[in-house]
Amino acid sequence: MTAEHVLFFVFGAVSLIGAISVISFRHPIYSALSLIVTFFAQAGLFVLLGAHFVAAVQVIVYAGAIMVLFLFVIMLLNLGTLSAKSALKGKLKGLAVVLGVLLAIQGVYIAMTAGTNTALESAQASTEAVTTYKIGELLFSKYLLPFEVTSLILLAALIGVIVLVKRENQTEN
Amino acid sequence: MEIEILPQIIIPIIKILFIAHLLIIGVMAMIWSERRVSGWIQDRLGPNRVGPQGLLQPIADGIKFLFKEDIIPNHVDKPLYVLAPAMLLVPAMIAVAVVPFGDTITIADNVIPLQIADINIGILYILAITSLGVYGVVIGAWASNNKYSLLGGLRSSAQMISYELTLGLAIIGVLMLSESLSLRTIAKEQGANPWEWNFLIHLPAFLAFTTAMFAETNRLPFDLAEAEQELVAGYHTEYSSMKFAIFFMAEYMNMIVGSAVVVTLFLGGWHFFGLESIGGPFWSGVISFAIFFVKTGIFLFVFIWVRWTLPRFRYDQLMNFGWKFLLPVALTSIVVTGTLWIATNGSRLWIGIGNLVAAFIVVAIVAGIMAVDNNSKSAVQSAPDAPPLRGLDAIE
């Protein structure tokens, strides 16, 4: 057991506990907070893999995104605590079971095919020092099209939000 | 992997302890100098009774806070209420880990970089960690279950979302020129003399970054989250005793870290006319640390100076300023720096001039658009067929 292994299990456990608490807390504020814990622990896992850039970006992007989620909860969902019954009704429950089973099968399949190498070791071997430079180079050469498409999607979302907000204002006047 | 005890364990621990204590002492020094400088600016004395020149006042304050009754109101959400001050303080404390507070120092043949951790994404780490700080404010505000607190928290989050963009975009020009995200490399790339430092090359970005940093640290003129006249004390209204003191300390710690980052990115780090390289390998390290310390101190003085000079912004002014002036200026600096870097083969002079000219043009355009906008609005309001104001008339 090296220090990396210990840290891997710590971050893995924290991110699992966080993920479970997201769905088991009754209150949306607590769920959102658990989500931050999960993402933070995942950032720790990225650091262990040598992907510092991805780790930092993970925290920057999701910290802002969950902040918006928070505001959403505070401003729009003035509901105190959710009762578990009201959240999962009828058909939704069936769908949840089906999706859960699918996810479990996926997990087992990945665990079976992963081979003897632990994920940590294989990833460390392949990603020796993922520098920001390399990521930038890949983004602007090999993955240029997906990169540009993503930016277009974000732009469309931005314009959509502005249009929606503007329309509301005009009807008020 | 073999672990060498001295360079890998003992020296880092000494550095961490040194910096952590320096931060806390810095907070005490800031509380004292804030009150003394405000007294000086307002032509009064300020606290001068406890110790020489009132220097022990922060310690007296601290003892007072510690012995006050720690009240947890009945109506709060207890776990989050207790957690919130820590969520604000911890990011402020760990952000300093990547700040290079000097060049290397050589003690008994060990070359020690004066920095806790030189990671290759230093500045992104700072942005990531400081963006977590606002959670402490919002969680504390929400958990207090108090309308004034909640309003303060919401204002603070809106402010963070608006100004964080500027904070991130304004540094990209700097990163382009130094071709690195590591704070040590950025500080090193800037030359010894002040005219080689980044604040002249990226003057608009420097001003935008500094302004955004004032907003991120919730300092006047951006302290809408705790506007006394409107919100009692904003997000920490319900907090008392040491929990309140922790909010207070976190604010000052954020200021210290912010100043240190500005000094590293824009004000040449530990460079000052080559003074840092005189003396042997030991003394040059000490001198470079002293230079960094003094620069950070001067910038912290600017923080206090601004607080007692400018009045607080109105909420709409805050939003307009952030989105319509700072953000375009920061974006322009990226485009201009990139273009001129290619066009003039990396000439710092031309990039500096280009940035300045472009920023003036952008600000002029935005100001022009806003002036036209205001004119058309006031024309609508004064038009005779505008609907009458509905106030008491409607009720009658």
Image: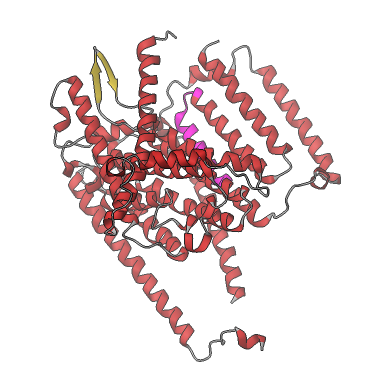
Q: Nearer the viewer, residue B327 or B389?
A: B389
The quadrant the C terminus of chain B occupies is bottom right
Q: Nearer the viewer, residue B48 or B36?
A: B48
Decide if residue B38 is on the left or right side of residue A41.
left
Give x and y (percent) for residue B215: 41, 52
Q: Nearer the viewer, residue A77 or B234?
A: B234
Q: How is the image coloured?
A: secondary structure
Query: How many discs appear?
Result: 0
Residue depicted at 58% across the width and 25% down the height: A11
Whether residue A36 is visible: yes
Q: In the picture, residue A120 is in which quadrant?
A: top right
Decide if residue A28 is on the left or right side of residue B172.
right
The range drawn in magenta is A48-67
Give x and y (percent) for residue B100: 31, 31
Answer above or below: position of A2 versus A82.
above
Answer above or below: position of B188 versus B258.
above
Give x and y (percent) for residue A134: 41, 30
Is residue B251 magenta-colored?
no
Answer above or below: position of B14 versus A77.
above
Residue depicted at 61% across the width and 85% down the height: B392
Give x and y (percent) for residue B208: 34, 53
Residue depicted at 29% across the width and 23% down the height: B113
Is residue A64 magenta-colored?
yes
Q: Main secondary structure of the magenta part?
A: helix
